[in-house]
């Protein structure tokens, strides 16, 4: 697969307790959907600290049993493929222009 030099970076923010309609963890459902639609790749990042719309602080501090830590899913692909995925996701979403320097070995 080859990517154009000018792509879009999609970032999706939510909590690790969030679920898709079928009950799967939301991050898993998003990555599976990205793979099924032929996206170049997706990465799930788990944050140690964060808050969202509710202003509730979610933390991974040792003295506190933490749940619902912040999750960010990042996907880079051609803008039109990113745009097609956005309507299916119900979370805080950001999109920015990125330049792809290298994707794989270039073979």
Image (spheres, helix red, strand yellow):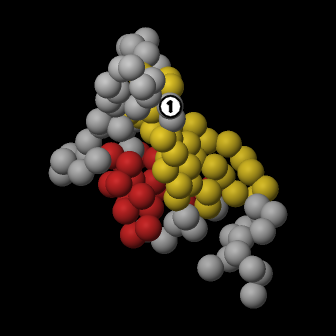
Residue 69 spot, x, y in % from top left: 40, 31
Q: Going by the image, does 67 lie left or right of 10? A: left
The answer to whether 98 is drawn above or below residue 67 in the figure is: below
Residue at far left of view: 22
Residue at far top of view: 55
- In which quarter of the view is residue 57 placed? top left
Q: What residue sits 35% from the left and 26% below the top? A: 66
The answer to whether 89 is drawn above or below residue 6 in the figure is: above
Q: Going by the image, does 68 lie left or right of 85? A: left
Q: What residue sits 66% from the left and 52% below the top? A: 8
Foreground residue among 60 and 50: 60
In this figure, what is the number of numbered marks? 1
Residue 39 spot, x, y in % from top left: 52, 66
**Dot 1 corresponds to which residue?**
48
Q: Dot 1 lies on which element?
A: loop
The answer to whether 25 is drawn above or below residue 31 in the figure is: above
The answer to whether 87 is drawn above or below residue 48 in the figure is: below
Residue 56 spot, x, y in % from top left: 39, 13
Foreground residue among 89 and 84: 89
Q: Is residue 6 visible?
A: yes
Identify the image quadrant of the N terminus: bottom right
Q: What residue sits 37% from the left and 62% below the top? A: 32
Q: Going by the image, does 31 lie left or right of 106? A: left
């Amino acid at each position: 697969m080859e990517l154009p030099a000018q792509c879009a970076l999609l970032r999706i923010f939510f909590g690790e307790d969030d679920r898709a309609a079928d009950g799967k963890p939301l991050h898993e459902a998003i990555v599976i959907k990205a793979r099924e639609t032929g996206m170049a790749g997706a990465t799930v990042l788990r944050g140690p600290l964060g808050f969202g719309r509710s202003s509730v602080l979610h933390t991974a501090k040792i003295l506190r049993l933490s749940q619902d830590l912040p999750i960010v899913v990042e996907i880079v692909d051609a803008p039109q493929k990113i745009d097609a995925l956005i309507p299916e996701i119900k979370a805080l979403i950001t999109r920015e222009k990125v330049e792809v320097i290298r994707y794989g070995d270039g073979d």
